[in-house]
Image: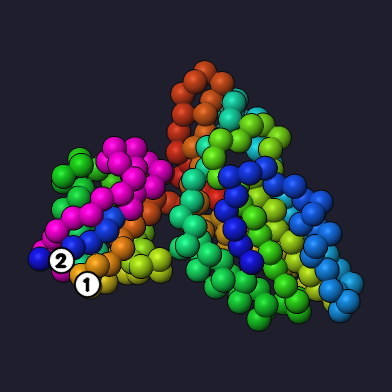
Amino acid sequence: MMTLHLTYYASLREQCGRSEETLQTDAVTAKELYDTQRVRYGLPWASNHLTVAVNDHMAPWSHPLNDGDRVAFLPPMAGG
Amino acid sequence: MFALSSAPIDQHPLRTAFADDESGAYVSFEGRVRNHNQGREVRELFYEGAETLAQNLFAQIEQEALSQFAIREVRCIHRVGLLQIGDKAVWIGVLAAHRGPAFDACRYVIDELKSRLPIWKKEVFIDGTSEWINHP
Protein backbone atom coordinates (compact mmCIF):
# COMPACT_ATOMS: atom_id res chain seq x y z
CA MET A 1 0.00 0.00 0.00
CA MET A 2 1.15 3.52 -0.84
CA THR A 3 0.09 6.81 0.63
CA LEU A 4 -0.78 9.41 -2.02
CA HIS A 5 -1.90 13.03 -1.84
CA LEU A 6 -4.66 13.96 -4.28
CA THR A 7 -5.81 17.42 -5.31
CA TYR A 8 -9.05 18.13 -7.15
CA TYR A 9 -9.79 21.23 -9.18
CA ALA A 10 -12.79 22.90 -10.77
CA SER A 11 -15.54 20.47 -11.81
CA LEU A 12 -13.69 17.56 -10.19
CA ARG A 13 -13.47 19.45 -6.90
CA GLU A 14 -17.19 20.12 -7.02
CA GLN A 15 -18.08 16.56 -8.00
CA CYS A 16 -15.86 15.02 -5.31
CA GLY A 17 -16.97 17.55 -2.70
CA ARG A 18 -13.40 18.20 -1.61
CA SER A 19 -10.26 19.89 -2.87
CA GLU A 20 -7.75 17.38 -1.53
CA GLU A 21 -7.31 14.12 0.30
CA THR A 22 -4.64 11.68 1.40
CA LEU A 23 -5.35 8.04 0.72
CA GLN A 24 -3.88 4.56 0.85
CA THR A 25 -3.97 2.71 -2.43
CA ASP A 26 -2.70 -0.29 -4.34
CA ALA A 27 -3.12 1.51 -7.66
CA VAL A 28 -0.02 1.00 -9.79
CA THR A 29 -0.59 3.74 -12.37
CA ALA A 30 -2.27 7.14 -12.48
CA LYS A 31 -4.99 5.60 -14.67
CA GLU A 32 -5.72 2.88 -12.13
CA LEU A 33 -5.93 5.49 -9.39
CA TYR A 34 -8.31 7.64 -11.43
CA ASP A 35 -10.54 4.70 -12.27
CA THR A 36 -10.77 3.86 -8.56
CA GLN A 37 -11.69 7.44 -7.66
CA ARG A 38 -14.08 7.67 -10.58
CA VAL A 39 -16.12 4.79 -9.15
CA ARG A 40 -15.85 6.08 -5.60
CA TYR A 41 -17.14 9.57 -6.44
CA GLY A 42 -19.35 8.68 -9.40
CA LEU A 43 -17.34 10.88 -11.72
CA PRO A 44 -18.95 11.08 -15.16
CA TRP A 45 -15.71 11.69 -17.05
CA ALA A 46 -13.56 8.92 -18.54
CA SER A 47 -9.83 9.47 -18.13
CA ASN A 48 -9.40 10.31 -21.82
CA HIS A 49 -11.29 13.58 -21.18
CA LEU A 50 -8.82 14.58 -18.47
CA THR A 51 -5.06 14.86 -17.96
CA VAL A 52 -2.98 14.11 -14.90
CA ALA A 53 -0.09 15.72 -13.06
CA VAL A 54 2.23 13.92 -10.67
CA ASN A 55 4.40 16.00 -8.33
CA ASP A 56 3.57 19.21 -10.23
CA HIS A 57 4.54 17.89 -13.66
CA MET A 58 2.29 16.55 -16.41
CA ALA A 59 2.43 12.77 -16.66
CA PRO A 60 1.03 10.08 -18.96
CA TRP A 61 -1.84 8.02 -17.57
CA SER A 62 0.51 5.03 -17.56
CA HIS A 63 2.81 6.85 -15.11
CA PRO A 64 3.76 4.49 -12.25
CA LEU A 65 2.93 5.87 -8.82
CA ASN A 66 5.30 5.98 -5.88
CA ASP A 67 4.69 6.36 -2.17
CA GLY A 68 4.18 10.00 -1.25
CA ASP A 69 3.36 11.21 -4.76
CA ARG A 70 1.12 14.25 -5.20
CA VAL A 71 -1.44 13.52 -7.89
CA ALA A 72 -3.89 15.92 -9.54
CA PHE A 73 -6.48 14.96 -12.13
CA LEU A 74 -7.01 17.92 -14.43
CA PRO A 75 -10.17 18.91 -16.31
CA PRO A 76 -9.69 20.48 -19.77
CA MET A 77 -7.90 23.78 -19.32
CA ALA A 78 -9.58 27.11 -19.95
CA GLY A 79 -7.28 29.96 -19.01
CA GLY A 80 -7.08 33.35 -20.66
CA MET B 1 7.98 34.86 -14.74
CA PHE B 2 4.47 33.63 -14.08
CA ALA B 3 2.09 34.15 -11.18
CA LEU B 4 -1.51 33.57 -10.27
CA SER B 5 -3.03 36.55 -8.52
CA SER B 6 -6.13 36.84 -6.39
CA ALA B 7 -5.74 40.63 -6.47
CA PRO B 8 -6.74 42.80 -9.45
CA ILE B 9 -4.13 43.14 -12.19
CA ASP B 10 -2.72 46.67 -12.44
CA GLN B 11 -0.86 46.90 -15.71
CA HIS B 12 0.90 50.18 -14.96
CA PRO B 13 3.50 48.96 -12.42
CA LEU B 14 3.94 45.72 -14.39
CA ARG B 15 4.78 47.71 -17.52
CA THR B 16 6.95 50.28 -15.77
CA ALA B 17 9.05 47.61 -14.05
CA PHE B 18 9.47 45.64 -17.26
CA ALA B 19 12.23 47.24 -19.32
CA ASP B 20 15.85 46.84 -20.30
CA ASP B 21 18.19 48.95 -22.39
CA GLU B 22 18.45 46.32 -25.14
CA SER B 23 14.70 46.19 -25.75
CA GLY B 24 13.16 48.63 -28.21
CA ALA B 25 9.81 46.87 -28.16
CA TYR B 26 7.33 46.08 -25.43
CA VAL B 27 4.15 44.24 -26.48
CA SER B 28 1.42 43.28 -24.07
CA PHE B 29 -1.82 41.38 -24.19
CA GLU B 30 -4.59 41.95 -21.70
CA GLY B 31 -7.51 39.54 -21.55
CA ARG B 32 -10.71 40.95 -20.04
CA VAL B 33 -13.98 39.45 -18.90
CA ARG B 34 -16.66 40.01 -21.54
CA ASN B 35 -20.40 39.99 -20.98
CA HIS B 36 -21.31 37.19 -23.38
CA ASN B 37 -20.14 33.78 -24.54
CA GLN B 38 -21.67 31.57 -27.21
CA GLY B 39 -24.88 33.54 -27.27
CA ARG B 40 -25.42 33.68 -23.52
CA GLU B 41 -25.20 36.72 -21.27
CA VAL B 42 -22.42 36.36 -18.70
CA ARG B 43 -22.68 37.99 -15.26
CA GLU B 44 -19.28 37.07 -13.80
CA LEU B 45 -16.44 34.56 -14.10
CA PHE B 46 -14.73 32.37 -11.55
CA TYR B 47 -11.15 31.26 -12.21
CA GLU B 48 -9.07 28.74 -10.33
CA GLY B 49 -5.62 27.36 -11.04
CA ALA B 50 -2.90 24.98 -9.92
CA GLU B 51 -0.08 27.39 -9.22
CA THR B 52 3.07 25.26 -9.00
CA LEU B 53 2.10 23.15 -12.00
CA ALA B 54 1.17 26.32 -13.89
CA GLN B 55 4.57 27.83 -13.14
CA ASN B 56 6.32 24.68 -14.36
CA LEU B 57 4.28 24.61 -17.57
CA PHE B 58 4.66 28.34 -18.17
CA ALA B 59 8.43 27.90 -17.90
CA GLN B 60 8.21 25.44 -20.80
CA ILE B 61 6.12 27.84 -22.90
CA GLU B 62 8.54 30.64 -22.03
CA GLN B 63 11.51 28.54 -23.19
CA GLU B 64 9.71 27.71 -26.44
CA ALA B 65 9.00 31.40 -27.05
CA LEU B 66 12.59 32.37 -26.27
CA SER B 67 13.92 29.76 -28.71
CA GLN B 68 11.43 30.47 -31.52
CA PHE B 69 11.38 34.27 -31.46
CA ALA B 70 14.10 36.90 -31.05
CA ILE B 71 12.78 38.15 -27.72
CA ARG B 72 14.44 38.89 -24.40
CA GLU B 73 11.83 38.15 -21.75
CA VAL B 74 8.21 37.12 -21.15
CA ARG B 75 6.09 37.75 -18.07
CA CYS B 76 2.54 36.73 -17.26
CA ILE B 77 0.02 37.27 -14.48
CA HIS B 78 -3.28 35.38 -14.45
CA ARG B 79 -6.17 36.17 -12.12
CA VAL B 80 -7.94 33.64 -9.96
CA GLY B 81 -11.15 34.14 -7.99
CA LEU B 82 -14.39 35.85 -8.90
CA LEU B 83 -14.10 38.43 -11.68
CA GLN B 84 -16.65 40.95 -12.90
CA ILE B 85 -17.32 42.12 -16.46
CA GLY B 86 -14.39 44.24 -17.64
CA ASP B 87 -11.92 42.91 -15.07
CA LYS B 88 -8.50 41.92 -16.38
CA ALA B 89 -8.15 38.12 -16.41
CA VAL B 90 -4.63 37.85 -17.80
CA TRP B 91 -1.68 40.08 -18.64
CA ILE B 92 1.24 39.04 -20.82
CA GLY B 93 4.24 41.23 -21.50
CA VAL B 94 7.07 40.60 -23.96
CA LEU B 95 10.34 42.50 -24.36
CA ALA B 96 12.36 42.32 -27.57
CA ALA B 97 14.83 44.39 -29.52
CA HIS B 98 12.28 44.76 -32.34
CA ARG B 99 8.48 44.74 -32.57
CA GLY B 100 7.94 41.82 -34.96
CA PRO B 101 9.20 39.05 -32.68
CA ALA B 102 7.53 40.73 -29.70
CA PHE B 103 4.09 40.60 -31.37
CA ASP B 104 4.64 37.02 -32.59
CA ALA B 105 5.82 35.77 -29.19
CA CYS B 106 2.96 37.48 -27.35
CA ARG B 107 0.45 35.73 -29.65
CA TYR B 108 2.24 32.42 -29.18
CA VAL B 109 2.25 32.69 -25.40
CA ILE B 110 -1.45 33.54 -25.01
CA ASP B 111 -2.45 30.77 -27.44
CA GLU B 112 -0.35 28.16 -25.65
CA LEU B 113 -1.42 29.39 -22.22
CA LYS B 114 -5.09 28.88 -23.05
CA SER B 115 -4.66 25.25 -23.98
CA ARG B 116 -1.83 24.16 -21.68
CA LEU B 117 -1.91 25.98 -18.34
CA PRO B 118 -3.93 24.40 -15.52
CA ILE B 119 -6.43 27.22 -15.14
CA TRP B 120 -10.18 26.70 -15.15
CA LYS B 121 -13.00 29.11 -15.81
CA LYS B 122 -16.59 28.92 -14.64
CA GLU B 123 -19.07 31.22 -16.30
CA VAL B 124 -21.96 32.49 -14.23
CA PHE B 125 -24.79 33.53 -16.52
CA ILE B 126 -27.25 36.34 -16.06
CA ASP B 127 -29.98 33.82 -15.15
CA GLY B 128 -27.86 32.50 -12.24
CA THR B 129 -26.86 29.19 -13.87
CA SER B 130 -23.18 28.41 -14.27
CA GLU B 131 -20.92 26.19 -16.32
CA TRP B 132 -17.25 25.16 -16.33
CA ILE B 133 -15.84 26.09 -19.74
CA ASN B 134 -14.46 23.28 -21.95
CA HIS B 135 -15.51 20.61 -19.49
CA PRO B 136 -16.72 17.38 -21.04
Q: In terms of depth relative to the viewer, which is nearer, B37 or B78?
A: B78
Q: Visible in this render: residue A45?
A: yes
Q: Is residue A50 visible?
A: no
Q: Label 1 belongs to which residue? A: A66
Q: How is the image coloured?
A: rainbow
Residue at (16, 45) in percent of width and height? A40
Q: Which residues are magenta?
A: A7-28
- Determine contact: label 2, label 1, CB under 8 Å: yes
How many numbered discs?
2
Q: Quadrant of residue A25?
A: bottom left
Looking at the picture, tell me which residue is in the foreground, A50 or A30.
A30
Q: In the drawing, does residue B34 fall left or right of residue B52?
A: right
Which quarter of the image is occupied by the N terminus of chain A? bottom left
Secondary structure beneath disc 1? loop
Residue B133: where, in percent of width, then height?
A: 48, 41
Q: Residue A27 has which mark?
A: none
Residue name at image x 46 percent, y 24 percent: B129
Residue furthest toward the top? B127
Q: Position of residue B51 (x, y in %)?
A: 49, 57
Which residue is the site of mark 2? Answer: A2
